[in-house]
Amino acid sequence: MKKTMILTIIIIQLLTVSAYSMEFTDTEGKDCEKAVEFLSVYGVINGFSEGVFGPDEFITRGQMSKILSIILGYGEYPDDFKSSFSDMDNHWANPYVEVATGLEIVKGYEDGTFRPDTAVTYPEAITMILRALGYTDESLAGDWPYDYLVKAGDLGILKGIEMSDGEAVRCDIASIVYKSLFIDMGRIDRESGLWKSSEVKLFSGLGHMEEVQVLKEHLEELSLFPELFDYLYYSGEIYYNNDNEIVYFINKNTEKFTGIVVEVDRDIINVENFEGNNETFDVGSAEIIFNNAKGRPESLMGADVSVIYRESGDDLIVDAAIGRKRTSVFLAPYPYESGNDYNGIDLPLIDGNLDLEKIIINGAVEFLVEIMPDDLVYAYETDEKSDKSILELLVVRNKVEGDMTYGKDNSSEGFSVIDKVRYDHSDMYMVSETFGSGYYVEAILDEKGDIVKHKFISELNHNEKYGFVLETLEGDSFVLPSIRIFDGDGYESVLNINTDSTMVVENGGFNNVKYVVNLEAGDSIIYTLENIDTVDEMRKLNYEQYFGLYRNYDMLLLQAEAFLDGNTLLLFKDDGRWAKLSAERLEEYIRGQIIRSEDDRYVEIMVVDDGIKTKYPNVLNGVIKNIEDEYNGFGEAVYRFEINIGGEIENIYSSTDIKNLVDIHDFKGKLIQLSLVQDRIVSYNTLIPELDFSGPVKFYDEKLLKIGESFYELEEDVVVYEAESVEGSYMVIGTVELSDIGENDLLRLYDLEGGNDGIVDTLIILKK
């Protein structure tokens, strides 16, 4: 291919190179480490595999062609170049070799070959690099290779390189290429025949560089170099690719001292690093950042700080002091609901409203509303006196639960052993009312895994267990009587009862003896086991009635002054059958019966009669689309209804008692009223409309319509069902908008939700 043709194709196909970064473990500590990193982010060089660069491997003629083609800005082009060399067909480097040949950077051999996989020598590699800079054989005095080696020495690109006559290694070539990037390119002057600088660096084919101090606005630019965050307020060079994305930063004479501020005297701060060394800095003219916002020197006292500074002659210039210090730490008392204050912390506002974008939350949750009671919250507040611009919260949700078998010092100096693991007490340790071995506890841990607070759950007594009786089964001369229970862990089991137990009554004659357990379903007991399935001793417990408030954030039954916890067995009667309940389903006000722990502080068992959260109200108005016969986990027949409730499709199951639902199939597609208990349908009723299908219709606005000669007021969120006429009746097929109603349509009107206030909230439309 002729030179003019190849140059034309290069210009047409000129594309940018996408930057990427790869870390190579085998270049760490080598002289070429930074060069390899820089060339890697621009895609100039690659490794052999992830983390492997091969610094001591040789480099081939094909690889050199690729490196220099990319540097000159020709990163991608068609791979179907017709080769100028006899040995390049189907070789991966063919397009790069053709470009480098067209630019007169490389040459082939007299036999018509290029030999792309042959290792280059140092003189050959240096010659290629200088040709990329615009030098030619004619422009340099002397014979090859000394003419090129002398010029390379003059340019300073061989400093630190121990060359030989043998194969060039990848580490050395990376260093030479990197230094060459910042050398001027040029061309041969036609009149003098000498090389003349274009005052454009070789690097220009990859992108551009700016000398800056890294500020926050740079961090907001498009970047493929996340490490730039580590260089905030540093002075140096930011490197961009041809897509104007930041890909690299080189620090120039900026240093950082990190430690804790131990003294502040006006604008002078004393910083002690983690090795115990102290440095004093004048921050009077520096940018002071405290907890992500502009701060004052005095606010840095006690903070972890990074001092960014430069040496200028004998002077030391501090550009920034970036401090971070927790301003408060607390156990979350309640979930956030509303307002611009959370547990005494001012929240950032925008136009008087909460600005969620300015709240940085790290750790166990992502959003403010996800913080739950007993989460440990570290707050990093700004030094601003009003209208906080930003707030950082670190949320730790880390707990351990188990037997506390040893406890030393009820203070931050102590430690506890829980389930055979030692936990130090945190420097934020909260003194526990009940402390010491012999308790089953829940311990809240800080970010280091140290205990912040013990939550006493119960005394250790592994012999005695709590149970809730589901059923009693009588015995005889061959079979022991038994009980089926929920145990204190919420598992269902059957336990045999010895006939000599005081809770067993003997009935019948000698030949027909029966043993009956003197308990009923719903009784609570405390018992010990003789073996895995036989009760040794047991006694019946008496319930205490509870009517009152339940405070969900600390699980307190307010009127009883007793807490629920992870071991409380919560039960309720679900569709005629006893079932377990989770505390999350309890309403604010509940009614039931409780069994307390021996110290009266905790509830062991609670039978809930009322106050259980449900998804649906007790009465629903909707249209049944479909009915399926199903069976529950006990093999009992139930219905599964697919119901259109104001445009939302819900799947709701029936109770197991379906005697009041046997005719409900006749009302598919009709608007009816459904009665529910604990989210299960138990019965239904037909609905009487305010007006049967009538017309014509005239709207005066979205709240008032006229049908015939009568006016009707509409609710703002009126539901409109669309129906088809079916054999003198109707069948609902979906929901539509008010705007879909035409003047000649027929409407059926209902007042279902307003307590007969006369305002229509539901329509059924028959299209004409």
Image (cartoon, rainbow, N blue to C red):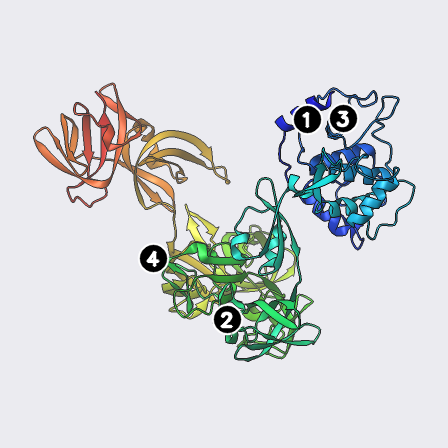
Which mark is in front, 2 or 1? 1
Q: Where is residue 351 in the image (x, y as percent from the top left)?
A: 34, 57
Q: Position of residue 507 (x, y in %)?
A: 51, 55
Three-letter code, disc 4: Asp
Looking at the rendered structure, the secondary structure element under dot 3 is helix
Near-viewer residue (606 or 417): 417
Which mark is in front, 2 or 4? 4
What mark, if any, has residue 7 been given in the picture?
Answer: 1
Q: Mark 3 sits on what residue?
A: 94
Which mark is in front, 3 or 2? 3
Which mark is in front, 4 or 1? 1
Q: Mark 2 sits on what residue?
A: 327
Can residue 342 be seen here? The reply is: yes
Q: In this view, does 557 lie above or below 494?
A: below
Looking at the rendered structure, the secondary structure element under dot 1 is helix
Q: Position of residue 229 (x, y in %)?
A: 59, 56
Q: Mark 4 sits on what residue?
A: 351
Whether pointer 4 and pointer 3 mark residues with C-beta atoms closer than 8 Å, the reply is no
Quadrant of residue 322 within the rendered picture: bottom right
Q: In this view, does 324 lie above or below 11?
A: below
Gap in angstroms between the C-alphas marked 3 and 2? 63 Å
Identity of the residue furthest to the front in this view: 191
Whether pointer 4 and pointer 1 mark residues with C-beta atoms closer than 8 Å, the reply is no
Gap in angstroms between the C-alphas marked 4 and 3? 62 Å
Whether pointer 2 and pointer 1 mark residues with C-beta atoms closer than 8 Å, the reply is no
For marks 2 and 1, the one nearer the N-term is: 1
Gap in angstroms between the C-alphas marked 4 and 1? 59 Å
Query: Which residue is depicted at the point 39% across and 34% down?
Result: 641
Question: What is the total number of numbered labels drawn onto the structure image?
Answer: 4
Looking at the rendered structure, the secondary structure element under dot 2 is loop
Looking at the rendered structure, the secondary structure element under dot 4 is loop
